Image: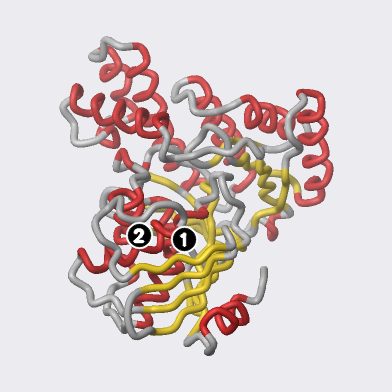
Amino acid sequence: MSDVASTFRDQYGRDPEGLWAAPGRVNLIGEHTDYNDGFVLPFALPMRVVAAAARADAGWQVRSDLEDEQASFESAGEPGTISGWAAYVAGVVWALRDAGYEVPPADLAITSDVPLGAGVSSSAALESAVLTALIDLGELEIPVAERPALAQRAENVYVGAPTGIMDQSASIRCEAGQALFLDCRSQEVEQIPFDVAAEGLAVLVVNSNAPHKHVDGEYGARRKSCEEAARLLGVPALRDVAADGLDVALERLDDDVTRRRVRHVVTENQRVLDTVELLRSGRIREIGPLMTASHASMRDDFEITVPEVDVAVEAALTAGAYGARMTGGGFGGCVLALIDADRADATAAAVADAYAKHGFTAPTPFVAVPSQGATRL
């Protein structure tokens, strides 16, 4: 990662007042459950967005090496006023001001090593880094537990991406060596020990290099389908359909597609709860079948996988992974595989070979270590 403090000095002719960082995330299990008021279990990546920042006399200027561009605005304006990558920064300013906070004018320089378009929440990392910097610069008294909702509002309302609360919660609230068990309704969290290295294990992340976008119609269509199903079933959200009542609920729905969407969400919530129980008792290897079942559900019931991620999952399992699944919103992105630590290279090679046989763009693998959420460096 480039020296963002030097970039700041070159751009603004002075030193920044500080550096703030926020990570990308992968979701161990619990996909498309967050906006259904359900449960998720992400952990933070070591890859992060870093913001160098200092207070300014007026307005906001941002230099980003993500696009090698500069943006400036005197006011964030209403949603839709600013587009492109700068909308995520302007959205944070807008969300803070809309919530009644006095946001300090600021100059910022942004750098990142979070992969873009890979389903590891590069946008939430950007929002969370900027949010943390502006809160500190303005000495705003905002509890950590309330910050993810502000970053989410920036993405939902200002940018226009209908994501749930998971991404911003993970980027802000995760802790090193832990997975974040989040109840997306109450926003209560529990840090779940996830020391894979101590068990001789590793989580291999394979970037499929099949990029995805959340602002397109497919993600929004899944969300609308879930909301309509909840309305038809007479519950506030699909989280309120219990696993043992799933069959009865499905019988009340006429449309097969809607039934499959509901089945994914309800069974996925249960898989999160089952995974948490196993991790609490230190039985990490036993979560593998739950991961694999989650992928099958995303593929068959929620229909959000693509051939690249399906091939990566199958190749990892054939190479001996305990479990593997797509992570993220779908239609591209990354795959997680729980493996023996000494099998990382062999598993990555197996996936690469499978990609070559299918004529896919080569994947990009890395080993993920549960890391720290947003912080001042």
Mark 1 or mark 2: which comes first in sequence? 2
Percent across and percent down for residue 11 are 55, 79
Mark carried by residue 171:
1
Going by the numbered disc 1, the residue's amino acid type is Ser
Name the residue rendered at 22%, 73% in the picture: 101
Kindly identify which residue carries mark 2: 151
Could you tell me if the residues under marks 1 and 2 are in contact, i.e. CB atoms within 8 Å?
A: yes
Asked if residue 146 shows in the view, the reply is: no
Name the residue rendered at 32%, 22% in the picture: 246
For numbered disc 2, what is the local secondary structure? helix
| Up/down of 356 relative to 121, above or below | above
Residue located farthest toward the bottom when viewing the structure as drawn = 14
Percent across and percent down for residue 253 are 26, 14
Q: Quadrant of residue 196?
A: bottom right
Q: Is residue 326 left or right of residue 244?
A: right
Q: Quadrant of residue 138?
A: bottom left
Percent across and percent down for residue 67 are 57, 58
Q: Is residue 126 left or right of residue 257?
A: right
Q: Nearer the viewer, residue 283 or 326?
A: 326
How far apart are labels 1 and 2 at the CA level?
Answer: 10 Å
Mark carried by residue 100:
none
Q: Nearer the viewer, residue 224 or 15?
A: 15
Q: Nearer the viewer, residue 30 or 159?
A: 159
Q: Is residue 158 left or right of residue 270?
A: left
| Up/down of 6 relative to 62, above or below | below
Name the residue rendered at 67%, 71% in the picture: 2
Q: How many callouts does the rendering have?
A: 2
Q: Nearer the viewer, residue 86 or 127?
A: 86
Name the residue rendered at 30%, 11% in the picture: 255
Going by the numbered disc 2, the residue's amino acid type is Ala
Quadrant into which the C terminus falls: bottom right
Percent across and percent down for residue 45 are 58, 59
